[in-house]
Image: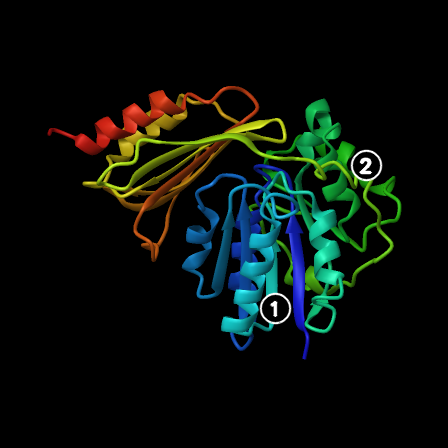
Amino acid sequence: MSIAVNLVTGFLGTGKTTAIRHLLRAHASAERWGVLVNEFGEVGVDGALLDGDGVAVQEVAGGCLCCVSAPAFATGLNRLIRQRRPDRILIEPSGLGHPAQVLATLTGPLYRDVLDVRATVCIMDARHLQSPRHREHPTFVDQIHLADVLIANKADLYSAIDLSAFEEFVWQLKPPKLAIGIVEYGRVDIDWLNVGRDSGRRAAFPESHAFLVDSEVETHAQDARHWILIEGTGDGYRRASWSISQRRPWRLAALRGVFSALGLERIKGVLHTDAGWMALNDDTWQDIRTPGDARSRLVLIDTAAIPARALDRSLRELDDGDD
């Protein structure tokens, strides 16, 4: 029997991982589910966030599944299929990942007899419709164009203008979506995964990632504590990623102060603190289970320069404590 597959797309910060965690909690326990997750940073964070939900998780970090990480995507997907034999796989590309090539791979001859590709679900933030930077970004546009299901998440933060703009926007989309939702906190209806798939959808910018090559990827500060900082650029964004084995848990109050002052577009991390393991998602902190790989991980993304070296010094000072 073919394995059901859903692509869950969405731009940076729309709540894809939160939505997937909700779906994982809602699915029938008799079904084996797997998740293939890709991140723009070189250090994986989402895999650690999903790992505690009792499903098989395969991570592909560094670049987008559609271009730089394409070979790793096939390797990760094959490993997930071979080792876990799931009934369904949810695939979460990076927020900067263009879905066209991923869909072409999933529906191509290599997987045609293995996978049953179901609805592509796009999680968006309706407030981004008021932002020219988002409306003019090819990946943002095509994540919406290629979706069978379009979900406006974070509705608790919307104004009446945001809701009206979203409703006007979706009714103009051609071909129409098979399902449209407005939700809070990633509470996606699990039935939306099975509404069907329109194979006639076409990307407006199919070549937008065709010649994208990451540049300026540089690794810094490796030492005996396994402290790695990686900086890079790609698709108009800068990123900094950390993987750290700490001497001691960081003080949560101090971490809050460090990160609240950054003001970056995307901050995501799994961090070992004196209050336990915490997930950081922009300005939201949440308790999580101890990850299988007990390292703190952090990814920062922005179009402007990221103060990575200064932040690295601050984190090292917290780790050194009173030494």
Q: Secondary structure under badge 1?
A: strand
Is 89 above or below relative to 228? below
Is 170 above or below relative to 293? above
Mark number, residue 169: 2
As shown in the figure, which amino acid type bears the numbered disc 1? Arg
Whether residue 312 appears in this view of the structure is yes
Badge nearest the viewer, 2 or 1: 1
- Mark 1 lies on residue: 88
Residue 237 spot, x, y in % from top left: 58, 28
Nearest to the observer: residue 240 or residue 151: 240
Spatial CA distance of label 2 from label 1 is: 31 Å
Residue 10 spot, x, y in % from top left: 65, 43
At x 33%, y 54%, the residue is 293
Do labels 2 and 1 touch, CB within 8 Å? no
Name the side, left or right, on which 93 lies relative to 150. left
At x 44%, y 46%, the residue is 45
Nearest to the observer: residue 246 or residue 60: 60
Residue pushed farthest left?
Answer: 323
As shown in the figure, which amino acid type bears the numbered disc 2? Phe
At x 75%, y 66%, the residue is 109
Callout 2: few (<14), some (14-19), or many (20+) C-alpha neighbours within 10 Å? few
Callout 1: few (<14), some (14-19), or many (20+) C-alpha neighbours within 10 Å? many
**Residue 115 appears in which quarter of the rendering?**
bottom right
At x 38%, y 27%, the residue is 259
Q: Secondary structure under badge 2?
A: helix
Is 8 above or below relative to 172? below
